[in-house]
Image: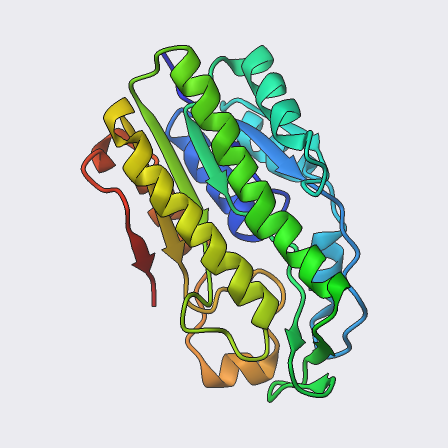
Amino acid sequence: MPHTAIVTGANQGIGAATARALAERGVRVLVSFLRYSPPPDPSLPAGYFSSRESGAEAVVEAITGAGGHAHALEVDLTDAGAPARLFDTAEELFGPVDVLVNNASGWVQDTFLAAGTDRFGRVLRAVTPQTFDAQFAVDARAGALLIAEFARRHLARGGSWGRIVGLTSGGPDGFPGEVSYGAAKAALDNYTLSAAAELAPHGVTANMVKPGVTDTGWVNDAVRERFPVARPEEVASVVAFLCSPAAGRVTGNIIHLH
């Protein structure tokens, strides 16, 4: 029976590349996305804003045009009812969900210092309730609720095979200049590693992937001059491997890419 995946934040960047990579391996993919208008930042390439504001039609068309199976569903992951809606839709279209990729982010760039710009010219905002909520609602709470929905349904049907993969950055050592982002991702790391331990007896693996700098549209010239930059497809190939039967002995890891 073909596997069914939910990939969040899959209208662009790593999420879109992951949806395509999974579909190429025969996985049926529910492409979760939300059109989002980031705050103005003249240091970022214009393509970043257009990609975040786009739908997922192009991703679905690329998959179906190549003979795969995909469907797009726009959901706001800050809504606590979003996980159930995603799983209901995927099950109705493709069957039980046994692959979950927590890729979506409510990315904001905030700091404990005075608002201004970072060393790459990008706009920095002070930490506020708004920046905290925007980040934690998607990266931490939504990720936890999606894992919980996955686990509940997996256990209810007596599932014996499953894959959970999250995308992370920052971590327990902090992320200066993107403090809420790093903290929220650290929370998702912890949720995912807990899932690895708790769900292992039920055939589920759970891992995090920590990419290096990846060009998902936000990389400006100043960043490119300082760091090696990966393509989303390079990250997606690792995620797709972790979602495959070949990765059955790989669980409870934060896998660093460079």
Report whether 38 appears left or right of 144: right
Residue at 69%, 86% in the rendered image: 117
Is residue 110 depicted above or below 121 in this figure? above
- Snapshot quadrant of residue 178: bottom right
Quadrant housing the C terminus: bottom left
Q: Position of residue 194 (x, y in %)?
A: 36, 43
User: Along the line of sight, which residue is nearer the eye, 131 or 96?
Assistant: 131
Quadrant housing the N terminus: top left
- Total numbered badges shown on the rendered structure: 0
Report whether 187 appears left or right of 54: left
Is residue 19 depicted above or below 226 in this figure? above
From this viewpoint, is residue 86 visible? yes
Q: Position of residue 7 (x, y in %)?
A: 53, 37
User: Along the line of sight, which residue is nearer the eye, 53 or 165?
Assistant: 165
Q: Position of residue 249 (x, y in %)?
A: 18, 37
Q: Position of residue 107 (x, y in %)?
A: 64, 61
From this viewpoint, is residue 7 visible? no
Residue at 59%, 81% in the rendered image: 221
- Snapshot quadrant of residue 131: bottom right
Residue at 45%, 71% in the rendered image: 229
Is residue 36 depicted above or below 161 in this figure? below
Residue at 41%, 19% in the rendered image: 154
